[in-house]
Image (spheres, rainbow, N blue to C red):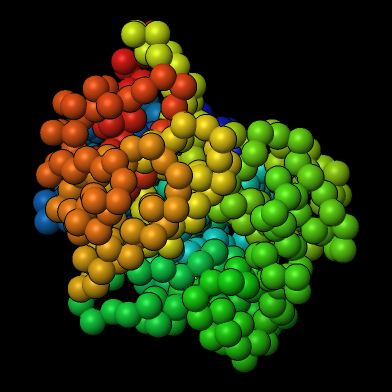
């Protein structure tokens, strides 16, 4: 995370914002104490993201976004201006102040809309039920091999997270690469970002609210098209649920549709029966790296489409992909030597999970390490809606065919899976992650590959950390 933020912080070549642009972006704002030639690199709404020349949004009582007033003294040196709904108590800091009406959230979005209107490059927006963060990183990397890019590599992907990131993007970039979730509404996110490319990675039952179905998720994801101009490009996973709907909706809006996946008709095809191999424009190419799981290859395939549309040479794309390092919590492989001289290998998928990503990850893990001793540590998939129990049960066939020696399950929802498989394979169940962590090292054998996957709220990232800390 720190590496990504440091890289992100170096993206700007100069400050975009000045007093005149603030007035144009937020016409109703009142500006105080602005010196001549004032400038800012952009807005931040969280103290951990502070950087030189930042405008700092202050969270007032009853508000939900911004930096808490008590943290302001430690941020003063890097602060270019305060943004607040009430300037009264902040004059004492002798800093420029932007007083906005309404709420701070509106100010964030207004600033983002303004900088987007002035950006002359292209925007690639990435969404989907899983794989967004990794794909965003890969798209940024392959484009950055040839062009100048900015990206929200810090995973802030709601309307407000996207917006404050955009205010800090380099206006002179050739491309902005933006991860976008349903947070704040996909239609609004599309109106803010106005994508030239929209990648929809997949559709799966995750973040299901009352009354939502898989179809409604597909409909909501397709709203990413709303802010796109005719002849822009939608990039779709051909094997995903509701592909026909996503494709037809894109075409109805006058978009070009390109596809990635395993189907022979895909524009970029992943050959799952050959290690690390793509078919690009009719030619086979193989990455010279350690074997990669299918879901990572699919993420890369989507990125290849964008890069080829923008004339990045295939050789440069492949070279970039071969250097790509998997992200912590999203497939990172770590070799660990424990204090009892056991050597183990952790595949860390602990950041997120839904029924689709869980199935694909287990299948990929099984295939990649087919000749190795393997172990699964799985936690609950959160926010699966009223069918959550069934979704957990439905993992049984995938787990049973995974050829692992041991399965450790934790969390109330995973009890449903345990009841399906406990008589068929070596399976241990724990009510919560703390109970499992206390017993964990007693079940880890030498030279074992261990995949750890769950929704972040299940807490299995703690399990990863415990194992790492147990290493020499």
- Front one among 183 and 261: 261
Residue 158: image location, x then y, percent: 38, 59
Residue 153 lies left or right of residue 439; in this view the side is: right
| Position above or below: 241 against 46 | below
Residue 448 visible (yes or no): yes
Looking at the rendered structure, the number of numbered marks drawn on it comes to: 0
**Which of the 4 image quarters holds residue 195?**
bottom right
Quadrant containing the N terminus in the rendered view: top left
Foreground residue, 120 or 180?
Answer: 180
Q: Residue at x 62, y 42 (%)?
A: 292
Taking 342 as reference, is 297 above or below it?
below
Whole-percent x and y of residue 283?
88, 57
Tell me which residue sits at (40%, 14%) in the image: 342
Residue 133, can we see it?
no
Question: Which residue does the image show at 46% across and 74% down from the upper left?
Answer: 221
- 462 vs 356, left or right, is left
Classify the position of the C terminus by image quarter.
Answer: top left
């Amino acid at each position: 995370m720190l590496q990504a933020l440091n890289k992100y912080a170096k993206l700007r070549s100069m400050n975009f914002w000045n007093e005149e642009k603030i007035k144009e972006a937020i016409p109703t704002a009142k500006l105080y104490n602005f010196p001549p030639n004032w400038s800012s690199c952009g807005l931040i709404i969280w103290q951990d993201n502070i950087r030189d020349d930042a405008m700092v949004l202050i969270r007032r009582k009853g508000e939900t976004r911004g930096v808490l007033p008590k943290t302001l003294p430690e941020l003063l040196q890097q602060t270019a201006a305060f943004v607040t709904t009430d300037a009264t108590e902040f004059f004492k800091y002798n800093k420029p102040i932007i007083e906005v009406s309404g709420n701070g959230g509106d100010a964030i979005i207004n600033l983002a809309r303004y900088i987007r209107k002035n950006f002359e490059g292209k925007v690639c927006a990435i969404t989907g039920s899983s794989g967004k963060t990794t794909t965003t990183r890969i798209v940024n990397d392959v484009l950055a091999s040839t062009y100048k890019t900015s990206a929200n590599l810090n995973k802030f992907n709601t309307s407000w997270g996207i917006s404050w990131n955009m205010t800090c993007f380099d206006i002179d970039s050739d491309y902005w690469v933006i991860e976008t979730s349903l947070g704040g509404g996909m239609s609004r996110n599309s109106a803010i970002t106005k994508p030239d490319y929209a990648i929809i990675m997949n559709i799966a039952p995750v973040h299901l609210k009352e009354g939502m179905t898989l179809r409604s998720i597909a409909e909501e994801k397709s709203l990413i098209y709303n802010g796109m101009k005719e002849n822009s490009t939608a990039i779709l996973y051909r094997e995903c649920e509701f592909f026909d709907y996503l494709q037809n909706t894109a075409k109805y809006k006058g978009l070009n549709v390109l596809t990635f996946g395993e189907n022979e008709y895909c524009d970029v095809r992943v050959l799952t029966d050959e290690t690390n191999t793509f078919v690009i424009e009719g030619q086979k190419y193989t990455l010279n790296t350690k074997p990669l799981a299918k879901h990572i290859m699919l993420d890369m395939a989507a990125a290849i489409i964008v890069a080829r549309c923008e004339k990045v040479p295939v050789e440069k794309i492949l070279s970039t992909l071969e250097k790509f390092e998997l992200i912590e919590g999203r497939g990172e492989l770590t070799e660990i030597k424990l204090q009892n001289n056991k050597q183990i290998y952790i595949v860390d998928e602990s950041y997120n999970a839904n029924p689709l990503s869980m199935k694909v990850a287990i299948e990929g893990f099984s295939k990649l390490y087919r000749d190795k001793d393997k172990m699964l540590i799985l936690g609950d998939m959160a926010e699966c809606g009223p069918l959550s129990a069934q979704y957990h049960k439905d993992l049984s066939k995938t787990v049973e065919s995974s050829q692992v020696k041991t399965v450790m399950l934790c969390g109330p929802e995973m009890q449903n899976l345990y009841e399906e498989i406990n008589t068929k394979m070596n399976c241990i169940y724990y009510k919560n992650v703390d109970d499992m962590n206390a017993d964990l090292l007693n079940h880890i054998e030498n030279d074992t590959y261990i995949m750890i996957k769950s929704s972040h709220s299940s807490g299995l990232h703690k399990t990863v950390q415990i194992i790492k800390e147990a290493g020499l």
